[in-house]
Image (spheres, rainbow, N blue to C red):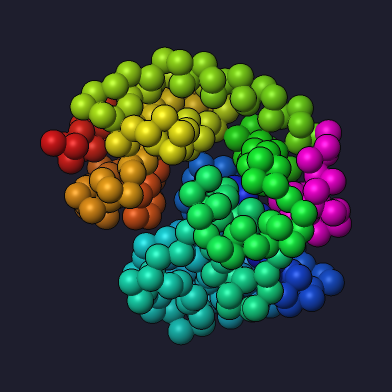
Amino acid sequence: MHLIVHHWDTDGITSAALLVKALKLKEFTNMTAPIGDFRFDERIWNAIEKANILYVLDFNVPNEVERVRIPTLFIDHHNQGRIKNPLVGQVNPSLKGEYYPSCSLVVSEYFNVFNAWSALGAVGDIGEKAFELDVVRKLLKKEGLSQSEALRLVELIDSNYIAMDRKAVEDAVRVLLENNTKDLLEYEPWLKKAEAIREAIEKALSDAEERNGFAFVEFESPFNIISKVARKLVWELNYRGAIVVNENFHGKAQMYFRISPEEAERIDMEGIIARLKALGTNSGGKREVVGCVCGRNKIRNALRIIEEYLG
C-alpha cells in the first residue's frame, strides 16, 4: 500500500495530488493528522504498519519520521534538521539554505510535474505574494485561472481544515484528482463551509489591536482561523507582524505568530519555536511563521515568550 500523510491545508492537499499524478498511483491511501496537531496519531501509525511505502508531504514532523520503519519519502519546505533514519529520503531545499514558498513547488520540481495545483499550493502558503513568481503566473494562465479565482480556490480548499473536518481534508485530494480545477469554484460542500468561516474571520479582524506596528488579536472560536487572520493582518493590512490567539479551540489554546519578510531578518523564529517547545507546547513553523497549540493554562506564558522578541 502507498500511504500519503500530508498537511491539512491547500499546500499539503495539492502536494499530495501532485505526487499521485507524478507517480501515476491507481491505489493509494492519503491521511492527514489531527488538525492543528503536529504528530502522527494512532490511526496513522496503524496505517503505517500496513503500508509498503510512506510519503510525508508538507508536514514538519521530523521526530515522527525518525521513528518510521518502512521506506519513506519526506518532502517539505519548512525549516528542519537532517533526518538520520536511513529508511527516509529527505527532500527539502531548506537543508541547503534555499527558500521555497510551498511544498507543492518542491514536489513539482522533484518530479517535474507542474500544473495549477503547483501554483495553488504557493498561493495557499504566501497569498498574493505568490503572484510575483513567474512560475505561478504562468501556471495559472495556462489553466485559465485568474488571480482572484486562485485565491478563492484556496479559500474553498482550506475551508475543510478550518472547519476541523478531517475526513473532508482527506477527501479533498481525490476531489482535486477527479475534477476540473476551475469547476471546483462551484463545489457546493466547500462553498457552505467557506461562508461561515469568512464571517468569523471578519469578526476577528475587526477586534485587532495595534502595538508598535504589530497586530494582537484574541478570541474564542471552533474554527481553525488563526493562520488566516494573521495572514490578512500582515499581507493585506500591512502590519509588521501579527499575534493571533484563540483562547478556547475545542478545549485547547492556539497561537499563531506571523511576521513580514523584513521582520524575519530581525526576529529569531527558530529560537522562539525552541523555547515554546521547552515550555511543553506543540509548536512548529518556518522562516516567517510560528504555530503553537497548548493547554489553556500555558497560553499566557507562550505569549510572553513571543513578546520578548518584539523589542
Work out which quarter of the rendered image holds the C terminus and state it: top left
Camera-side residue of 271 and 188:
188
Q: Along the horizontal axis of the image, is 217 left or right of 226?
A: left
The dominant secondary structure in magenta is helix
- Is the residue 296 above or below the residue 77 in the image? above
- Total marks shown come to 0
Residue at image location 65% in from the left, 78% down from the top: 112
Residue at image location 76% in from the left, 58% down from the top: 143
- Is the residue 284 above or below the residue 163 in the image? below
Q: Along the horizontal axis of the image, is 90 left or right of 266?
A: right
- Is the residue 9 above or below the residue 100 in the image? above
Where's residue 228, x and y in %? 51, 35
Camera-side residue of 110 and 298:
110
Most extreme residue toward the left, as rendered? 311
Camera-side residue of 19 and 209:
209
Q: Is residue 186 magenta?
A: yes
Residue at image location 83% in from the left, 37% down from the top: 186
- Is the residue 10 above or below the residue 17 in the image? above
Residue 108, quarter of picture: bottom right
Where's residue 169, x and y in %? 69, 46
Residue 194, quarter of picture: top right
Q: Is residue 265 magenta?
A: no
Is residue 245 in view from this perspective?
yes
Where's residue 67, x and y in %? 47, 70
Most extreme residue toward the bottom, as rendered? 86
Q: Along the horizontal axis of the image, is 219 left or right of 192?
A: left
Magenta stretch: give its range.
Answer: 170-188
Is residue 298 in view from this perspective?
no
Residue at image location 35% in from the left, 76% down from the top: 96
Residue 290, quarter of picture: top left
Work out which quarter of the rendered image holds the N terminus and state it: bottom right
